[in-house]
Image (cartoon, coloured by chain):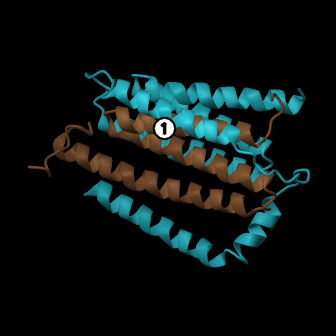
Amino acid sequence: MTVYDIIFYLFAAVTLISGFFVVTNRNIVHSAFFLLFTFFGVAGIYVMLGADFIAIVQLIVYVGGILILILFGVMLTNNIVNVEIKTGTIHALPASIVLGLFAGAIGAAVLNTNWKVVESPDPVPTTAAIGSMLINEYALIFELLGILLLIALIGAASMARR
Amino acid sequence: MLNVGLTHFLVISVTLFSFGMYGVITRKNAVMVLMGIELILNSANINFIAFAKFGNYGLQGQIIALFVIVLAAAEAAIALAIVINIYKTITNINVDEIDSLRD
């Protein structure tokens, strides 16, 4: 076991344990904070995969943007003063049985498949290459995503103010 | 077995996907359903980047992951606007009680 493996298992444990608590915790604010640790763990896994730029984007967009948005959603849709912020669950037992079977099936398929792994070169900084790809090969998708994001934000603002 | 390879990342992705799906199916609160969707998108991103690295596909998987992150941001903004609108209209965001369209 190398240092790489130990760090990987650390990030994997953080991701999976906090991910488990996100969906099982009854207090929705606690769930949001466990989601924070899940996003940090996933960013660490991106770093282990050599995707440094994606890891930073994950931190900025998910932790800095989406998580704050979700926390505001919790605050605006629950009456914090006199109602406890708890949420119920429905169909917990059938859902866990079916999803356990699903995860077992997919996991067995993953473990039993003989993946053709190409030995990849050592990780290099990816930011410059990603930037150049975004304005060359993927320029159209990049622009379309920008327009989509603008439309989504205008729509969200107009919908929430109505 | 203990040496980290492609299957480790795929197993993490499957587990995270199952947790997210569990959240989407079982939680009543609409904001919790959103959190489950975020978990599912993250697991998909792990798959993209893991296959890009271990299949030696260069940076294309990372670019797709970047696009997925952008779409997740747009989705979260729209969905929270809808949730807040529903809360203003019927003061409740439990997804099993929002059924006025059915009647």
Going 40% across and 36% down the picture, which residue do you hit?
B32
Q: Nearer the viewer, residue A115 or B14?
A: A115
What percent of the width, then of the height, locates residue A49?
78, 46
Whether residue A35 is visible to the viewer of this picture, yes or no, is yes
Q: Chain of mark 1?
A: B
Q: Nearer the viewer, residue B79 or A137?
A: A137
Label the brown chain with its letter: B
Q: Nearer the viewer, residue A117 or A79?
A: A117
Going 20% across and 39% down the picture, which residue do you hit?
B91
Assign a secondary structure to mark 1: helix
**Quarter occupied by the C terminus of chain A:** bottom left
Q: Viewed as shown, does residue A130 lie left or right of A101?
A: right
What percent of the width, then of the height, locates residue A21?
51, 24
Whether residue A39 is visible to the viewer of this picture, yes or no, is no
Going 50% across and 72% down the picture, which residue do you hit?
A147
What percent of the width, then of the height, locates residue B49?
71, 52
Which residue ends up furthest to the left in the rendered image? B103
The number of discs equals 1
What hue represents chain A? Answer: cyan
Tell me if residue A97 comes above or below residue B24 in the rendering.
above
Tell me if residue B102 comes above or below residue A132 in the rendering.
above
Dot 1 surroundings within 10 Å: few (below 14), some, or many (20 or more)?
many
What percent of the width, then of the height, locates residue B1?
80, 29
Q: Viewed as shown, does residue A71 lie left or right of A88?
A: right
Tell me if residue A50 comes above or below residue B5 in the rendering.
below
**Quarter occupied by the N terminus of chain A:** top right
Q: Viewed as shown, does residue B32 lie left or right of A66?
A: left
Give the residue type that dot 1 points to. Gly
Mark 1 = which residue? B20
Q: Viewed as shown, does residue B60 lie left or right of B35?
A: right
Going 71% across and 58% down the picture, which residue do you hit?
B62
Question: Hey, which quadrant is residue A34 in on the image?
Answer: top right
